[in-house]
Image (tube, rainbow, N blue to C red):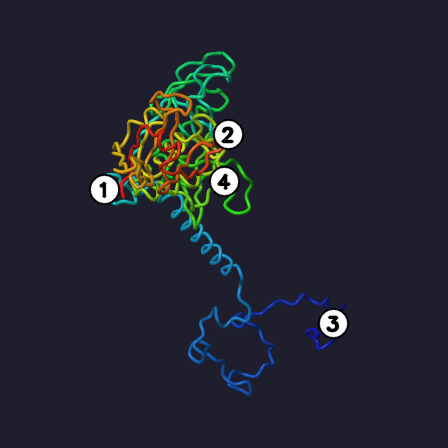
Amino acid sequence: MKIKDYDDNGLFENKKKKKSKVRHVETHIDLPDDTPEVGGEYGQPENMLDTWGLAKQEATLVRKKRKRFLRFGIAILAVILVVLSVFNFLPAILPGFFKRTNIELFVEKKVNLEYDDTYRVVNYYCADLMSEPDPASERITQVLYNEPVVLLEDTGVNDYVKIRTTDGIEGYIKSFRLTDDTDSVEPDLHEYKLIVSDTYKNVMSHANNGTLITKVMMNTVLYADVKRDGVYQVALPNGDKGWIGSSGVIELGTREDTNKVSCRYFVSSVLSQSNATYIVNGLTQKGMSVNGLVYVCADVNGVKLPRSMKEQALQGTEVELQYDVVTGDLLLESIEPGDLVFLKSPYSDSNEIYEMAVCTDTGVLLMVSNAKTTIRLRNFKATDDIAARIVSVRRIFME
């Protein structure tokens, strides 16, 4: 498109329309020769600084955006540098400055590893410890999940290895029930020690709506690194992690032991195992013996006992039984709740210990059923056969 304009002689001429440009107030403009002099009808030019308090840059009609972007970029860079300093540079540098101080935040935790490469850890809820590398041999006891044991020998027979428990019992166990990763039982690698006080607890893959990883039984010891409302994240054999609810769990320092409590807590733990399936020298709800029940329930409540019945018959204090002076019958009140009662065989006159029971109330014993299938409560009287079979009574817990 062309527009008309005047030439030097006052005639119109066609010129190409030039592209318009943004013109700034401070830009000098050449006016035509016939423009009235300054001070004429257009008035005097205003000084923007004196009149309006505006600097040259502020008086322009359109600002350049380049400096605005530059300032924004500098601000973003500053934020990034601050974040990097807080999360990367400072944690790496500051411990060096405070390493020899008593400031708790920068005191390095001492790590003393307890287990060398001769140790293994049980990776199943419990595993049978046999007298020979043969599943048909005698079950000596069981070892619980996450329990450390010493590897003594790889027999090469029926996939059994010979091990020794931390309380000195030797026997044979299936090799696939063990792992050589001991990180899950090293106290100084973790923050909390947990002891299962319920009959069992579920270990889940997530804190909420997770899947079941395994069940752990009473007296199982786990170590945790994270504690949230109602849950712990626990270390598992083979380097795995899981979540366990806080109810039915005793929290301790990683090198602390459970404090001894009163007898009623022991009795409560014992009663929780009532009606458990009976197996010889079993330790769990899925297969329990009376001596196994006493071992785990006493340990949970702060008393260390041997695992075998014969050794338990030597623990605690001997109870002197009392008898009626007229009838000669046993006074049932002389056997208190929590006492361990050892009985001879009903089929022999020998006073050798044949079985054991736990008194849970006056005249009530928790013992193996007559059918040898479960552990059940049984009432007895002073005139019953059970009273006549009592060989010894041992008191472990005092009120």
Cα separation, mark 3 vs mark 1, equals 85 Å
| Element on which disc 4 rests | strand
Within-10-Å neighbours for mark 4: few <14, some 14–19, many 20+ = some
Which callout, 3 or 2, points to the residue nearer the camera? 2
Mark earlier in primary sequence (1, 4)? 1
Q: Cβ–Cβ below 8 Å for labels 3 and 1?
A: no
| Type of amino acid under label 4 | Asn
Front in this rendered view, residue 376 or 315: 376
Mark 2 or 4, closer to the camera: 2
User: Alpha carbon of mark 2 to alpha carbon of mark 1: how far?
Assistant: 67 Å
Residue 364 shows up from this direction: yes
**Residue where numbered disc 1 is placed:** 101
Residue at image x 47%, y 32%?
Answer: 369
Q: Which mark is residue 202?
A: 4
Q: Secondary structure at mark 2?
A: loop
Q: Earlier in the sequence, mark 2 or mark 1?
A: 1
Front-most of 223 and 374? Answer: 374
The kind of residue tagged 1 is Thr
**Pointer 3: what residue?**
3
Q: For mark 1, does the 10 Å Cα neighbourhood hold few (<14), some (14 to 19), or many (20 or more) residues?
A: few
Whether pointer 4 and pointer 3 mark residues with C-beta atoms closer than 8 Å, the reply is no
Q: Given the current orientation, which residue lies at the most extreme front position? A: 326
Q: Secondary structure at mark 1?
A: loop
Q: Which residue is mark 2?
A: 371
Decide: is 359 above or below 179: below
- Work out whether mark 4 precedes mark 3 in sequence or the reverse, and give the earlier one: 3
Asked if disc 1 and disc 4 are in contact, CB closer than 8 Å, the reply is no
Q: Is residue 357 above or below residue 151?
A: below
Q: CA distance from mark 4 to mark 3?
A: 90 Å
